[in-house]
Image: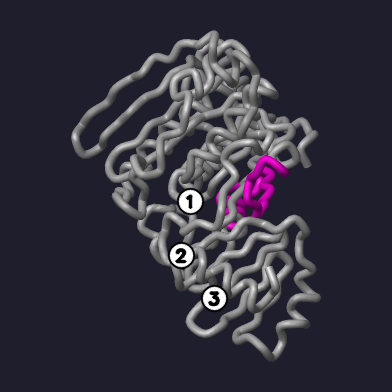
Amino acid sequence: MWGFESPLSHHQMDGRHQRYDRQMRVPVIGEAGQRKLAAARATLVGMGALGSVTADLLARAGVGQLRLIDRDIVEWSNLQRQMLYSEADAAAHRPKVEAAAERLQAINSEIQIEALARDLTAANHRELLADSTVLVDGTDNFATRYLLNDYAVEQATPFIYAGVVSTYGMVGSILPPEGPCLRCTYPEPPAAADTPTCRTAGVLGPAVSVIAGLAAGRVLQLLVDDDAPQSGFQYLDLWQGENTSLRASRDPDCPCCGARDFAWAEGRRGVRAAEPLCGGGAVQVPATEQAPDLAATARRLAGSVEALQESASFLRFRSGDLEVYLFADGRALVRGTEDPGRARALLAETIGA
């Protein structure tokens, strides 16, 4: 899937029915720029609020290959701002990447989409991020962002950073090997106690759309114009009307792009424990060392749990007031609690994890 050259099709270039006509009329795009977009491979990590809006924009713009990576399922609380999902997706608790891929393919059937219901970790990131033209941040935690930064610097792959909470957010361009990396500007991730999240501060839907639009714009600029992209960050508060550009400079003593110490990529930092999800009401439990045999687990659980449902990507069941999703990569999602201890206890009782 990821090695093909993607010239514009006759259908795309037909003057009587030209999908990208208005985009190609933009002088900085043109036909040459559209061909560059068609040949690009964008990997989006996190298909929540930012990721879903950014993916929608890139799919409509004709980026030829989109790889979607996300560990979560669709919840009712997502629908206020996560543009790709419907009430039917929330009612079925579909994996976000599956619902997103289906919607994006309906939007643009001429691009290729790969949906990976995985948790990006130090153990699998090289496999999941390989062959990317650009990495796009749609995550909700700094451990994954610093992992992406490590990989971007190590592999000299451009990385577009984005984050939003409440009414404000920030985007940034990490352009190795010349440009500064994330750790040049922010050597250490902020302490969890000092970092507002969508669970503690909420998030305004229009703020998501604005920040995602800025991120998608940086991706398109990067893919189309070799000379235009510049490193740096842009902060915007939609409610207060603030818009600030923060120029970044390379730190020769940076532990990542200077000393090439890839602590997150090597698993020495950022290892996540069981944690409540940003949307609330659920706990994500990291994968075990050995991926489960879903079919065998389903047979073993039959008769001892409620509402047992098996699919290719996950196993779903209820036990009392809690609902469990066991994914093919070994992760588990326990809905109905925000207590990691209670979530782990249920998994130990039901599947022995």
Which callout, 2 or 1, points at the residue further toward the start of the chain?
Answer: 1
* Residue at horizontal 51 percent and vertical 71 percent from the top: 342
Which sits earlier in the primary sequence, circle 3 or circle 1? 1
- Alpha carbon distance from label 2 to label 1: 10 Å
- In the image, residue 57 above or below residue 274: above
- Judging by the rendered image, the residue that carries numbered circle 3 is 323
Image point (61%, 53%), residue name: 101
Instruction: Count all numbered tags in the image, as a single digit.
Output: 3
Q: Which contiguous range is marked in magenta?
A: 100-124
Question: Are the residues flagged by discs 3 and 1 in contact, CB closer than 8 Å?
Answer: no
Q: Residue furthest left?
A: 240
Q: Secondary structure at mark 2?
A: loop
Q: Which kind of residue does numbered mark 1 sit on?
A: Gly
Q: Earlier in the sequence, mark 3 or mark 2?
A: 2
Foreground label between 3 and 1: 3
Magenta stretch holds residue 116: yes
> Does residue 73 belong to the magenta stretch?
no
Mark 1: secondary structure: loop
Q: CA distance from mark 3 to mark 1?
A: 21 Å
Residue name at image x 59 percent, y 51 percent = 70
Q: Which residue is mark 2?
A: 75
Q: Looking at the picture, tell me which residue is in the foreground, 186 or 210.
A: 186
Give how far across and how far down residue 1 sits, in percent: 78, 42
